[in-house]
Amino acid sequence: MTSTAEEYDVIVLGAGPTGENVADRTVAAGLSTVIVEAELVGGECSYWACMPSKALLRPVAALADARAVAGSREAVDGRRLDPAAVLARRNSFASDWKDDGQVRWLRDTGIELVRGHGRLAGERTVTVEAEDGSERVLTARHAVVVCTGSRPVLPAHVPGLAEAHPWTNREATGSQTVPGRLAVVGGGVVGVEMAAAWRALGSEVTLLVRGDGLLPRMEPFAGELVAEGLRGAGVDLRFGTEVTALERADGSGPVTLALDGGGTLTVDEVLYATGRAPRTADVGLEQVGLKPGDWLEVDDSCTVLGVDGEWLYAAGDVNHRALLTHQGKYQARITGAAIAARAQGLPLDTSRWGAHAASADLAGAPQVVFTQPEVAAVGLTRAAAEAAGLRVKTVDHEIGSVAGASLYGDDYRGRARVVFDLDRKVLVGACLVGPGVAELLHSATVAVVGEVPIDRLWHAVPSYPTISEVWLRLLEDCRG
């Protein structure tokens, strides 16, 4: 084994969107930065999550929109998606699982790339093991940032699970063929999105949910409307159902799921969408006094707690604040600014909404679920607001009642809710469900994060006739 030693201002572990954005910010601040990656530069989002999954789901929405309007409905009547074309387009959005373009961006931005598995080896020190067994030792003058993301979690102690070779999000977004029968286990975002996508591509999809509803972290009506939409698309949706064992006799043929209650289900593939865990089991946390495999607890500047010297940071999924790509990139911008400030000997502004505080993680993180119908939410649900001790009022409105929605699609059906803080007179949360609502979300995010008083929002006039006119109806009810 050979070894070389190199010094940089900043070392970033993980070249996903979060790591790339940290490196971009620190280089822009004049700090030499190296990024370490063992897989593809661009990370989970580019190749196995956001981009390929939304490339699968966009044709589903486009066809549904065409079917929702008289005139275009007749043009597509009886037509189905072309799976080969959809998968080919998905492949292009995943760059055919090649990272040449993203590597070129690193080089053009002035960011060094070291291929291999990076591990902390002590204060401001990282060792990188390459595929050929050679080792490089990297030291940081100012900071090491862990941006290694998360991985799918499979339930422990389910007989036959490993031998069944279940899909995770990677196989679900990357499959080059359409399974005839697909079981999806889990009622969260990945579960409902992939059920919608593969059903539209021709799979017979059964969605198995242990609880009694979908999307449990959102407003209850969101899960109810998504369940209705999935059933309308032909998904066999079963609540209160748990898989107790799996059997795949030859490792590649059909898999049989044993269900609690005594029934069985035989499918060609089974997707487990049952949660995420941090990729920290083998990054050297024990070398700095932390427990391998744990989420990394951070303060609002994304500085890791429990490590002296304020040199170790963690941004993105790995800190468990908000497991969303855009929030990881947001945290990266905050982290980069904090590193740059400390490198210059400047104090950090970690006040609420300060330059070095990722306040939006807790107060204004937006999320879209690209099912049919779409779900868009930001801030607190009513239950979360009440649990936080806020005195709130919730206002609901049927989105289909505004002119823009009826123009968007015949018999448009959807629902909007805002959570109104009665003491501060601001919105603290919003949830919208219906076709096309994803593009309404940023207006809600600005209102929540900006803490814009209701009386000022009253002067933000929505254009007529657009779906955004639902904001006028919601504000009328808040003021009333």
Image: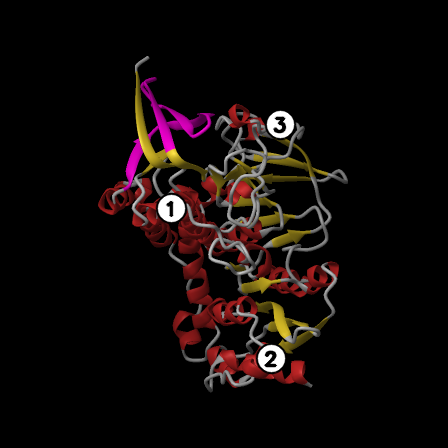
Mark 2 or mark 1, which is nearer the start of the sequence? Answer: 1
Mark 3–mark 2 distance (CA, rounded to whole Å): 55 Å
- Compared with 322, 72 (above or below) is below
Whole-angstrom CA distance, mark 3 to mark 1, is: 56 Å
Name the residue nearer the viewer: 447 or 268.
Answer: 447
Task: Check disc 1 and report its element: helix, strand or loop.
Answer: loop
From the image, state whether disc 3 or disc 2 is nearer to you: 2
Q: Amino acid at mark 1?
A: Gln
N-terminal-most mark, 3 or 2: 3
At numbered mark 2, what does the secondary structure look like: helix, strand or loop? Answer: helix
* Residue 199 belongs to the span the image colors magenta: no
Q: Which residue position is annotated with label 3?
A: 160
> Taken as a whole, is the magenta stretch helix, strand or loop?
strand
Name the mark nearer the viewer: 1 or 2. Answer: 1
* Residue under pointer 1: 344
Quadrant including the C terminus: bottom right
The image shows residue 105 at horizontal and vertical percentages of: 26, 46
**What type is the residue that disc 3 sits on?**
Gly
Look at the picture and state if 62 lies above or below 459: above
- Counting from the top left corner in percent of width and height, residue 370 is at 50, 59
Q: Closer to the observer: label 3 or label 1? A: 1
Q: Which mark is residue 454?
A: 2
Q: Nearer the viewer, residue 215 or 361?
A: 361
Quarter containing the N terminus:
top left
Q: Which residues are magenta?
A: 111-140
Residue 38 shows up from this direction: no
Amino acid type at circle 2 is Ile
User: Relative to 402, does residue 438 appear above or below in the rendering?
Assistant: above
